[in-house]
Amino acid sequence: MGSNNGIDDFGHYNRYNHRPYFVKVVSFDLRHKEIGSLDEDSEDTLDPQNSLPELPSFSSTEIADLYGDNPYFQEQPVYGARYQNDKGFVVFRTTSVAVEHLAFRFEIYVDYGLLKSIKKVEEEANKKIDGKNFIQPEICESSSTHSKEIERIGIAYCMPSSMSDTFGKTAVPILAKTQQPIGLLNVDYVFIRALEPRQPVSLEVSYSRHWKKRNKALEVGHRGSGNSYTKFAASRENTIHSLNRAARNGADFVEFDVQLTKDKIAVIFHDFHVLVSVTKRSGSTLDLRASAEKFDETVATDFHELAVKDLKHQQLKLLHLSHHKAPENTDKLKVTCDPTEADENQPFPTLVETLRMVDMDTGFNIEIKYPMKLKDGNDECENYFERNMFIDIILNDVLTHAGCRRIVFSSFDPDICSLISLKQNKYPILFLCVGITTRYVPFLDQRSATSEMAINFAASQSILGVNFHSEDLLREASPVKKAHEFGLVSFVWGDDLDDRKNVEYMKQIGVDGIIYDRIGEIEARKNVFIVERDAKNSLFSTTPSPSRHGSLDKNSLSPSNSIPHSLNTLDVAPLPVANAVSSLNDSSSSSSLTPSTARSLTPTSPKRKSRFSHEI
């Protein structure tokens, strides 16, 4: 709860807005008197009704400083974490079984010793020391380090009534010791609820942090066979046909975008909006009975932009739709297909259809499309679905219909990544990062502003890794190394990967996955999981060479009936070996033969088989 906090001072105190502060969050249940209350009342203390329950309704509040060297969640220091407006991003989290009674007390501290050090540095910096050769003194930047001159200057209370939604922003007044308001504390918050309807939870199979390292990067088909609305592609993007075409061309994974329709069906489509083509009036009448088959594109039309979330699935399939850039290029950007096209070419396939109809050997990189605020003040799509409900629908489709398919989720919205991670433990998540870019309007959320912040966020949430923007990595490859130091997996996406030279460069710097258009059309390739499985099957299916010893003769037995040497060299157990090979043939394992794998030639438990059949 609580991220990207901001402290604003009232009136003539505005000069203090950019001071460094220390912030600590204390959770408490409104039904009970909190431990360590700032205003002890002896009469209340004696009242048995105000005593704390035997078991608390919330956990201790942990903190993660995404600007620090250690971004992992940890116990709060005594005086909280250091925070400075525009130079900090601090996340607090707690778990509660009674959210409706959960409140927070924010304690604001000032370290006067630190302020003196900062003032000294500023004074030294203003001096002209040998022209340009001034070296700025260092100040300790640790988020928890403070001097002995630290003092609490104010507190702020965030009540349940201030957080009426599961996601939002609230501003609470900061009160001084005199109970006078001295500023405002701006808090972003998100409530993550358990998956509904409840799914059976098991730790038998979990790939949230599992990834098999390979010598080569996995290659992922972008929107199947590539972006077809603004680039050239052999088939319409994000369709069953496009995804299967990429699979036939040897894609290890295919990447596609998922969002919800008005009737809450998860569909495959990239953009939040479409253009609906409406025939202009002819005279004073307008024929509304014209069907899709009779639609004449030569007739003058008007385009009306509508959000996908405002149209039911059946409407999306029946209306004449164009890409939102259609007025700029009417030749490429028609979404609605011709009536003669096969069903697998139809746009807006459902997620369930995709899980059922695309080659099972091909993994899915499912990008969850959720609108975000942009830095220019615009919103990608306003009044969208509530986050928990939105994710629950998509997760239930996947958990019910995915089978043993390899799946990796991803999203540009960091809170969506957190929701997916906490609601299930089976599939891993990648945080999609735009980074520093001149091609797109950046998001307002600081966590995607740079590759370094994206790495810190992914590490703090213990998710699989980061999907970097190629523009960032071509400028500076160090984020890949830093991600590996944190034990994170690195993927890369971007238009730069249309150039094969850039794809090869990404392999050289050590990324684990590359997402690009028109996979397998320039250079033939084969799905790595099929290659590994075939290699393993051929290894175990090799026919044993016959023994040079003759058949076992009863006269060769020693008087003591001991087993002769010839029995030790004979392949006497073909049936168990055949069973083991069959078990491995049914698996999609990509493991190489190791001593632990060799042991699986004996009858294996279901758990061992499950691990093989799901390995990424």
Image (tube, helix red, strand yellow):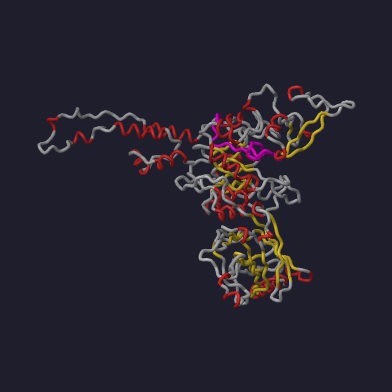
User: Count the marks: how many?
Assistant: 0
Left or right position of 10 against 3: right
Residue found farthest to the left: 559
Quadrant position of residue 10: bottom right
Part of the protein shown in magenta:
247-272
Relative image position of residue 406 (x, y in whole percent):
51, 39
Above-or-below relation of 568 to 113: above
Examine the rendering and report whether any part of residue 593 can be seen: yes
Q: Nearer the viewer, residue 515 or 202?
A: 202
Q: Nearer the viewer, residue 164 or 73?
A: 164
Above-or-below relation of 414 to 557: below
Examine the rendering and report whether any part of residue 27 can be seen: no
Q: Is-magenta flag for residue 128?
A: no
Relative image position of residue 19 (x, y in whole percent):
70, 68
Q: Is-magenta flag for residue 251?
A: yes
Quadrant position of residue 157: bottom right
Relative image position of residue 155 (x, y in whole percent):
67, 70
Assign the N terminus to one quadrant of the image: bottom right
Relative image position of residue 304 (x, y in whole percent):
79, 36
Above-or-below relation of 419 to 361: below
Q: Residue at x 63, y 45 (%)?
A: 390
Q: Nearer the viewer, residue 228 or 50?
A: 50
Left or right position of 558 against 185: left
Above-or-below relation of 508 to 115: above
Residue found farthest to the right: 283
